[in-house]
Image: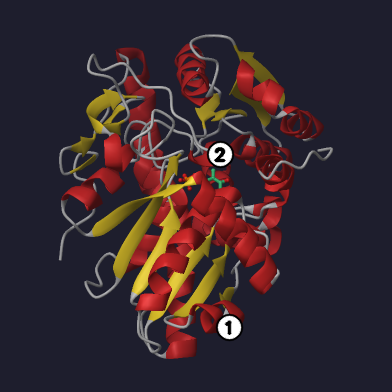
Amino acid sequence: MISNEAKNGRFGEFGGQYIPETLMNEIHKLEEAYEHYKNDPEFVAELDKLNREYAGRPSLLYYAEKMTRDLGGAKIYLKREDLNHTGSHKINNVLGQVLLAKKMGKTRVIAETGAGQHGVATATAAALMDMECEIFMGEEDTIRQALNVYRMELLGAKVHAVKTGTRVLKDAVNEAMREWVSRVDDTLYVLGSVMGPHPFPTIVRDFQSVISKESREQILEVEGRLPDVVIACVGGGSNAIGSFYEYIKDDGVRLIGCEAAGKGVDTPENAATMANGTKGIFHGMKSLFCQDEYGQIAPVYSISAGLDYPGIGPEHAYLAETGRAEYVPITDEEAVRAFEYLSRTEGIIPAIESSHAVAHVMKIAPEMSKDSIIICTISGRGDKDVAAIARYRGVDIYE
Ligand SMILES: *Cc1c(COP(=O)(O)O)cnc(C)c1O
């Protein structure tokens, strides 16, 4: 068994705190506050109440009987994070972080967003908990995701279009980090995935590990044993680490992360960090990144905006290096087929991100025995993706 507790903010050699001196003090305060509140019964009870009464937890562990029969192998269970308030696992993390910000005496939260999902979730939690909220979003993304910009504004947030770099997610992270440095007194940066400097990868993982805490209890209750395989999609890696975490100590449970291969891992258009990435330091952490020979972060591509990040969380880099988890690339075409398949077979339209995990279930379930069990996390619902999938199939509809 390997230990996965961060030591000095590191998972093996990955992680760490590569940040400007001016932020060090604030990061230490955050570390201290988190260490205190995570064991504070009042904080734990408040978060639990928010999870139950606001987010709708526990999420269902659904036995996909038709899919199981159709694929003809392993029993398939779906962990339904798509049923959470705001439609994905992101709410698990933002409720925790915004509550933490409030306890720390902050009155303002900021966040980065790519497609807008983490921005919408943060704006939601900020509205609920009476916090000022500002969201940084690449200018390109504000144009592509105009509906989410309006949604965040409806929720009372201010959206900044970031005009630096390539004007996408990685630039939004840079800008949010810069903004935080310039105003730490009343502000907490609510990071959207298991990335960035320590303690963010640990904080986000802990808030997301509610997924595997529940699924472990649920599967033990219905099947009387642990699953053989747990599968989740990986962008930065927060729904995957949340889905894996409680099983890391169970050597018999295979953990599989599905990353975005876009048009193929050997084409320039993908976001497959595990397949193509190399070690580097970016966004405050040491991890694996898609980069060129000079260490410049490479432009990445996926049909799924939520998996379109040029790096991966440090704990995943460590799980891959130690062999505890496996990571597989899934192409756009495979994900779109899985999106359509789950919709038709079970009447569940998954997010295109989650469809990457479903695609891998479709590959391995038929080859597994009928008494084996797979748990696949459906990280979000697919309503947001319907127009893009239609476009992919050559059908033009209004968004
Ligand atoms: C944001 C998002 C992802 C990717 O983020 P992770 O941190 O890798 O989980 C996956 N699925 C959905 C539905 C998302 O909104």
Most foreground residue, 70 or 378: 70
Instruction: Please name the residue shown 44% across and 15% down the image.
Output: 181
52 in relation to 113, above or below: below
> Where residue 193 appears, x then y in whole percent?
45, 41
Give the residue type at disc 2.
Ile
Q: Judging from the image, what secondary structure is the residue with disc 2 in?
A: loop
Checking the image for residue 65, the label placed there is 1
Give the residue type at disc 1.
Glu
Residue 52 visible to the viewer: no
Viewport quadrant of the C terminus: top right
Q: Left or right? Give the position of 181 relative to 273.
A: right
> Where residue 2 appears, x then y in whole percent?
16, 60
Q: Judging from the image, what secondary structure is the residue with disc 1 in?
A: helix
Instruction: Please name the residue shown 34% across and 52% down the image.
Output: 328
Instruction: Please name the residue shown 50% across and 29% down the image.
Output: 189
Dot 2: few (<14), some (14–19), or many (≥20) neighbours within 10 Å?
many
Counting labels gives 2
C-alpha span from label 1 to label 2: 28 Å
Asked whether mark 2 and ligand 1 are closer than 8 Å, the reply comes as no
In this figure, which residue is indicated by the disc labeled 2?
Answer: 303
Instruction: Please name the residue shown 57% across and 62% down the image.
Output: 48
24 in relation to 214, above or below: above
Which image quarter: residue 296? Answer: top left
Q: Left or right? Give the position of 108 relative to 367.
A: right
Q: Determine the residue located farthest toward the right in the rendered image.
A: 398
Residue 298 visible to the viewer: yes
